[in-house]
């Protein structure tokens, strides 16, 4: 798999530059541009093009609080008359298929698809291709189909490695450390990449004493899994690999209910507000911060060009691709950052992902002062 990433906060500046110039550039295109032109014709006059944004679920806070508003705002800035047909499948693959079909029936010129699961997403992409509607795989790559035109995400295997390496650091590389792994959903391609990356970092260096794949990424199910692990282990563990902040919250709730003090280091992902606050309190060790704004805006730039029949500027992807098993998909990838209490101020807050006011509510004022945020 060929991948290239843009590092950390530099991603925000780099992608901001390409987004500002995207409307005036007429480079590139090729097969993808031809598909976009056909799709633009279907959508009627370019100014009235319809762009479907298909989100996977709402249990992970980022999709409705970050991805959707960033995407919609950028589309509006690029094309005030374009319509964003946004929907959320609430972790239901059948519902996402129905939403995609409704968007196509309603004249969507492009689908931006954040898949609930790989199999159903491939079906959606194939139906879109049959109608000459291009598909942008957003956040999750859709494997095994040639119907994906672009991919916008992060280097997801490196997310898992970053989590695993951070956990090893927190455990002081203790070889005998006992770790419970609370992975993401087995039906999610990203979940499997996170898991793979974490194992690359952890295998042979600690003991994985219990491991679970969490259906639907559900925090409640993660809490149940952690409760089962604690019972089996007689509460004896040294660390928890949790694939995202929702599963981390579930695992932490289970450990609190079991009376475990102090809590062992727990990983996470997405820099959710609740997770950032848990990190300040010392309940969660780290999260993975992914600059969602440039990700969403890059997807919006691609979607706008495809929907209105314009060639996608070559500098959006820089010619980089990811192979999904069927084709080399033109791709935008960003590099994630590990965030702990020590660098919260210089990452999440400096990038205005969350403001001091949002984080440092009454319950967290003292923790914010201790971390040098206030």
Image (cartoon, grey):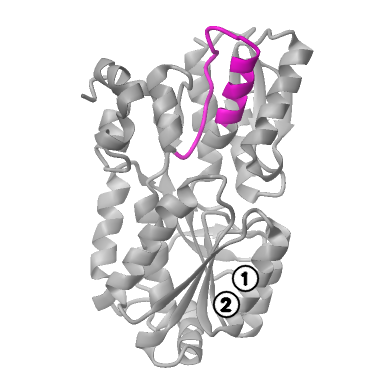
The x, y position of residue 57, in whole percent, is 58, 53
Alpha carbon distance from label 2 to label 1 = 6 Å
Asked which quadrant contains residue 234, the reply is: top right
Callout 2 environment at 10 Å: few (<14), some (14 to 19), or many (20+)? many
The answer to whether residue 205 of the structure is visible from this angle is no
Q: Which residue is mark 1?
A: 99
Residue depicted at x 37% and y 82%: 310
Q: Nearer the viewer, residue 5 or 359?
A: 359
Against 302, residue 58 (above or below) is above
The x, y position of residue 353, in whole percent, is 32, 43
Residue span colored magenta: 248-270
- Indicate whether residue 24 is drawn in magenta: no
The x, y position of residue 9, in whole percent, is 29, 42
The x, y position of residue 321, in whole percent, is 50, 60
Asked which quadrant contains residue 207, the reply is: top right
Name the side, left or right, on which 12 lies relative to 283: left
Callout 1 environment at 10 Å: few (<14), some (14 to 19), or many (20+)? many
- Indicate whether residue 262 is drawn in magenta: yes
Asked which quadrant contains residue 78, the reply is: bottom left
Residue depicted at x 52% and y 7%: 262
Q: Which residue is mark 2?
A: 103
Helix, strand or loop for disc 2: helix
The mark total stands at: 2
Marks 2 & 1, CB-CB < 8 Å contact:
yes
């Amino acid at each position: 798999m060929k991948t290239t990433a843009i590092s950390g906060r530099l991603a925000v500046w780099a992608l901001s530059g390409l987004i500002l110039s995207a409307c005036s550039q007429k480079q590139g295109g090729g097969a993808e541009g031809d598909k976009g032109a056909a799709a633009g014709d279907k959508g009627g006059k370019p100014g009235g093009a319809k762009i479907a944004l298909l989100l996977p679920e709402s249990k992970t806070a980022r999709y409705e609080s970050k991805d959707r508003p960033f995407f919609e705002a950028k589309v509006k800035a690029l094309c005030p008359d374009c319509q964003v047909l946004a929907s959320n499948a609430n972790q239901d693959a059948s519902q996402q298929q129905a939403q995609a079909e409704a968007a196509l029936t309603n004249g969507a010129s492009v689908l931006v698809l954040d898949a609930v699961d790989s199999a159903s997403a491939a079906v959606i992409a194939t139906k879109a291709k049959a109608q000459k509607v291009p598909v942008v795989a957003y956040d999750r790559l859709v494997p095994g189909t040639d119907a994906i035109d672009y991919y916008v995400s992060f280097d997801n295997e490196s997310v898992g490695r970053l989590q695993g390496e951070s956990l090893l650091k927190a455990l002081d590389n203790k070889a005998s450390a006992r770790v419970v792994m609370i992975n993401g959903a087995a039906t999610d391609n990203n979940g499997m990449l996170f898991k793979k990356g974490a194992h690359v970092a952890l295998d042979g260096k600690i003991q994985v004493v219990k491991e679970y794949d969490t259906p639907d990424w559900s925090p409640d199910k993660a809490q149940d899994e952690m409760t089962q692990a604690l019972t089996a282990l007689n509460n004896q563990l040294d660390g928890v690999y949790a694939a995202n902040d929702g599963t981390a919250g579930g695992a932490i709730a289970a450990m609190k209910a079991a009376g475990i003090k102090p809590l062992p280091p727990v990983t996470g992902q997405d820099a959710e507000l609740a997770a950032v606050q848990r990190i300040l309190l010392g309940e969660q060790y780290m999260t993975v911060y992914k600059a969602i704004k440039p990700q969403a805006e890059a997807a919006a730039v691609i979607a706008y060009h495809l929907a209105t029949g314009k060639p996608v500027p070559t500098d959006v992807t820089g010619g980089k691709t990811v192979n999904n098993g069927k084709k080399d998909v033109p791709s935008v990838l960003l590099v994630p950052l590990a965030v702990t209490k020590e660098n919260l101020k210089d990452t999440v807050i400096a990038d205005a992902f969350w403001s001091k006011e949002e984080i440092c509510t009454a319950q967290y004022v003292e923790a914010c002062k201790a971390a040098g945020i206030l």
